[in-house]
Amino acid sequence: MANTGKIVLLGAGGAAFTVSLFQDLVAEGGFSGCTLTLVDTNKESLDRMAGLARHLFAAADAGIAVEATTDRRAALDGAGFVVNAAAIDRNRLWRQDFAVPKKHGIRHTLGENGGPGGLFFTLRTMPLVFDFARDIEEICPGAQFINLSNPESRLVLGLSKYTRVKSLGLCHGIFLARWFICQILGIPEPEVELWGAGLNHFQWVMHLREKASGRDLYPLLREKEAAHDPSFTPLARTLFRSFGLWPTCSDDHTGEYLAYGWEGGEEGFDFDGDEKGREGFKTLIDEVVAKTKPIPEDWFKHSWGERAVQVIGGILHNRHTFIESGVVYNRGAIPNLPGDLAVEVPVVADAAGVHPVSLGPLPEAAAKLLMQQASVQQIAVEAAVHGSKDLALQALLLDPVINSTDAAKAILDELWELNKPYIRPCI
């Protein structure tokens, strides 16, 4: 079935990803005649973002029609692309995912994609995403599903294994790694190209090159890193020196997967700063929609690191678009990781869909480090898909972040009760 020019954004009331999508639709171009349908359960937030979309698209003469609805099934009718940015009570529950394990003696970094927090993000989010998938299978089975919500690897693995939906996860983590590398190299980011392979938030940079010449920049990185400020991204640099490749994407994200990850910092996410920033951003949007403030010039330019619109354009217009990083079902894209796993590798998007680009096998030791987390993710997905507390305990006891069986059981009981309204079998 050919993809249509109807794009549905689920969780459109969240400002950050939504504004980035608007920016990229304007800056990328080629979407005149398309329809963007915004969906959210929060009517106030939905109306705010719909008002911004109409104002921005009109100012840019983008030719994109905007719809807004709280009825997800109605929105999916005729969709060619479904983008998911939804999260369940994100900061309130995430705070508990971080605080409860700390109370029981677990040293961890973020509590979002790995460790106990990653497990409970998976348990509560998987049923919601499976609801989306079942509706897509019924209403718009040819649509490309693009997931922006965490935990990316686990959601894509569950969808790929248990549904017929064409799933792709997108993350800007590869560009965070480029930022860290470029601080050491002293080279502007646009002049550096890097390709990675591995897991979401834990890829190994396989190729690091000067974009214009193709020159390998790894020798220069090794030279400059040795003399760089030792307090700068210490965990990534320890792994770099030990395994020979730079890991993505940042110490706090990568650290979620490692028993010693807390050595890169264990302060957790800045929830208060995030909420303050979101309120300020909402105020700016309201002022722009009311036309008491002009549209910021940046909103007519590409966003930083997001690639959903480029994927959509590549498929819609058969552009054979290279995307630096996408989360896909492995099936051999990384030969020395399990086929039954979601991995992050470069992809190409065209009218036939999304195609992983294999960079070959990872160095053996690097692959073995990822294998620890592969097993955790596989069992966590089974726990979420089956709504099983027994499997959830197994996932915790497999996780290298867990240092005590008693702590694992106490964390499981406490966080299970907090998340019980959202946990249910998906199949």
Image: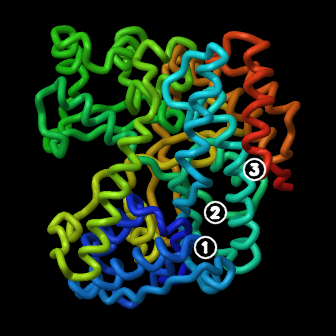
> Type of residue at label 1?
Ala
Q: Of marks 1 and 3, which one's residue comes earlier in the chain? A: 1
**352 and 69: which is toward the camera:** 69
Residue visible at 64% across and 23% down? 101
Quarter of the figure with residue 48 = bottom left
Examine the image and state in which quarter residue 95 appears. Answer: top right
Position of residue 244 measured from the top left corner of the image (x, y, whole percent): 37, 15
- Quarter of the image that includes the N terminus: bottom right
Callout 3 amino acid: Lys
Left or right: residue 294 versus residue 357 is left
Q: Position of residue 126 (x, y in %)?
A: 71, 51
Picture layout, residue 101 above or below residue 27: above
Task: State the separation of the CA atoms marked 3 and 2.
Answer: 11 Å
Q: Are marks 1 and 2 in contact (CB under 8 Å)?
A: yes
Which residue is under mark 3? 161
Tell me the residue at 29%/84% (across/down): 55
Which residue is labeled 1 in the image?
143
Answer few, some or many: residues within 10 Å of disc 1's Cα (few below 14, many 20 plus, some between 14 and 19).
many
Name the N-terminal-most of marks 1 and 2: 1
Above or below: residue 347 compared with residue 241: below
Query: Which numbered marker is on residue 166?
Result: 2
Q: Which residue type does callout 2 highlight?
A: Lys
